[in-house]
Amino acid sequence: MSSLYAHPIPDAIKDTDWRVFHHLAELSAAGSPIWDQLTVLRRHLNADILTISGPDEPLPNAARQVIVPLTYGERYLGQVCLALSPGASSEEMAARLAFFAPVFALALAGEQTPDMTETQEMRLYQATQEERDRLEAVLEATNDAILMIGTDGLLVTATLQFEAFFSIPRYEVLGCNINVLAERIEAQPGLPAGMADMLRVLADNHTESVGGEFEVTEPKRRVLAWYSLPVHSQAGLLLGRMFAFRDATRERELDRMKTEFVTLVSHELRTPLTSVKGFSDLILEGDFESLEDDVREYLRIIALNADRLIALINDILDITRIESDRIELHPTRCPMQDVIEQVAVCLQPLLDEHQHRLVMEIEPQLPASWADHSRMVQVVSNLLSNAIKYTLQPGVITVQASYIEAASDLPSGAPHDVILPCVLIGVQDTGLGISEEDQGYLFQRFYRAKDVEVRMVGGTGLGLMIVKSFVEMHGGKVWLKSALGEGSTFWFTVPVVEGKNPPRDKDAGV
Amino acid sequence: MSRILVAEDEPHILLLIQRKLESAGYEVIPSTNGEDAMKLALSDKPDLLLLDIMLPGCEGLEICRVVKATYGHQAPPVILLSALGQQIDVEAGMAAGADDYIIKPFSPRQLLERVQSALYG
């Protein structure tokens, strides 16, 4: 007889072993007799003989067997013995048996504690039952559909809302394997195609928390926001995976209505503004020699403020589109020097008005980016007009553009996750500068620096948020370096798809 | 002297455009709805059409398409005018055969420059 007393630490535990372990733990917690658990394990391990014996009891008589001692704390409770079938590896079986041993040790230790009196037991039972009813009532009353899949892959919980959302009767799927539910979902009209696979994939995943949103068309059109995560008992034992589905139809509807409202209002505002701006321009541009100086000045103020209002409406429209993910990029091969030059030409009147000097430091032969030209114009235009506006005394505004291949070539203060290679663009001014406190909030919408001088300059607090959104949509990053009274430099990057020597040129034999 | 058909349902904006173009020496055929504009475009054959996209009766895009299809190579230039500032509208306008696209609000001087470049471009 070859016996092996072993207590090795299992290094690779099979998934199925994990599941059976949890199943046994659940049986044990539910108070089922230790022999039932032993039967489950015997079948799982494919063994003819699997016994538990007390400290002084004789071991079974088998040709080859593995024996694992059962201990609880300092107490030696007995041993679990498994008769090895021919060809089975004793080391492997010993390791697997040792893995399951704590379940039996715990059950044995429980059996050996003195019995409770019958009244005590009854009270405990009632309390448990009440708690269970309460929890069930709460679950039934929630507006979310909640599913719970046990570690053995069985659907253990499905709330009332689940029936309402998916019109699948609970009794058809409760207690069944997850595959039954998945097949039922696939057969149900109006549910999204990927939902069943999502359940199948996640049922085997005991670590990740995920979520998303999808639309069902039957029994009622709904947008459902869902999330799913593994759940554990207070003692840390994995209980399974939970899915929660929430009706987000109204939220989405409100989002859409808000967007439509803003778009409509903005559109309706443009028409009267066209008249206000148009007629003041008509007078200012016309040959009204007789116009008195102060009248001309007042008209100029009217026109200027009409311009501000128009810019505000455009910004609000952009923000609304950004927030509702309705920005569509139309990327083309986009040389950034063209963008910068175009913006510089447009803003020349503003530069002249403030008597700033514009310095361009653009590296020759910058590789082109793959970007939406008009969005890039907006980004550069917002940064450059900020630089002009927030430099109150005549100053110098510098626009730089260079090709960056290595992270070490980026200016200090750059984020760590810049996609390379890229084109780096900087807009530097000699203006008011931004306090460290304000810098953290600068890219949020409607945020404006607290400084009084800054507040004197017209602005909406939307420009930088638009800059950040557009730059990030292109895979770039934006950051700044500034201190009060020392001017500011705003940097942003745009990834480039082709290196300095575009392959197309090589192909053409250039 | 070039004749320009201006279709715009907002009377103030129509007046604004009319004044600016007339002061530059153009003859303006004004129209405040799409059906009239369509008739005038086909009967009078103006030298240029300035069309608001959202017109009651018949949309500017439709007039543009019909005019371009009717006159073929001899079709007068068409400039569309709209408060819809989205790229997709610009593309729809260009697909309808428009030569240029002006977004409201506009400066009258810019409008004149665009008209001149469409006429003599």
Image (tube, grey):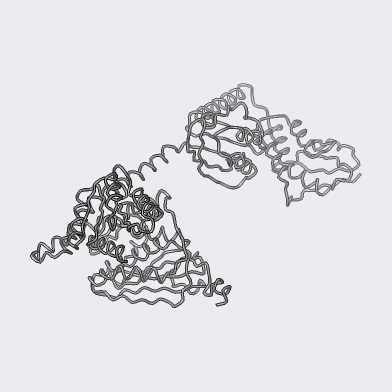
Decide which of A479, A308 is in the foreground and name it: A308
Q: Position of residue B63 (x, y in %)?
A: 33, 49
Q: Position of residue B69 (x, y in %)?
A: 39, 52
User: Residue A467 lies in what quarter of the image?
Assistant: bottom left
| Residue A458 sits above or below residue A67 on the image | below
| Residue A258 sits above or below residue A413 on the image | above
* Residue A260 appears in the picture as rendered: yes
Horizontal placement of B40 versus A379: left or right? left
* Residue A79 appears in the picture as rendered: no
Horizontal placement of A403 versus B90: left or right? right
Q: How many marks?
A: 0
Q: Residue at x 71, y 35 (%)?
A: A107
Quadrant showing the C terminus of chain B: bottom left
Decide which of A503, A14 is in the foreground and name it: A503
Quadrant showing the N terminus of chain B: bottom left
| Residue A97 sits above or below residue A464 on the image | above
Q: Position of residue A397 (x, y in %)?
A: 31, 73
Decide which of A123, B66 is in the foreground and name it: B66
Horizontal placement of B121 versus A370: left or right? left
Decide which of A508, A402 is in the foreground and name it: A508
Horizontal placement of A279 versus A345: left or right? left
Q: Residue at x 40, y 39 (%)?
A: A253
Q: Position of residue A452 (x, y in %)?
A: 23, 62
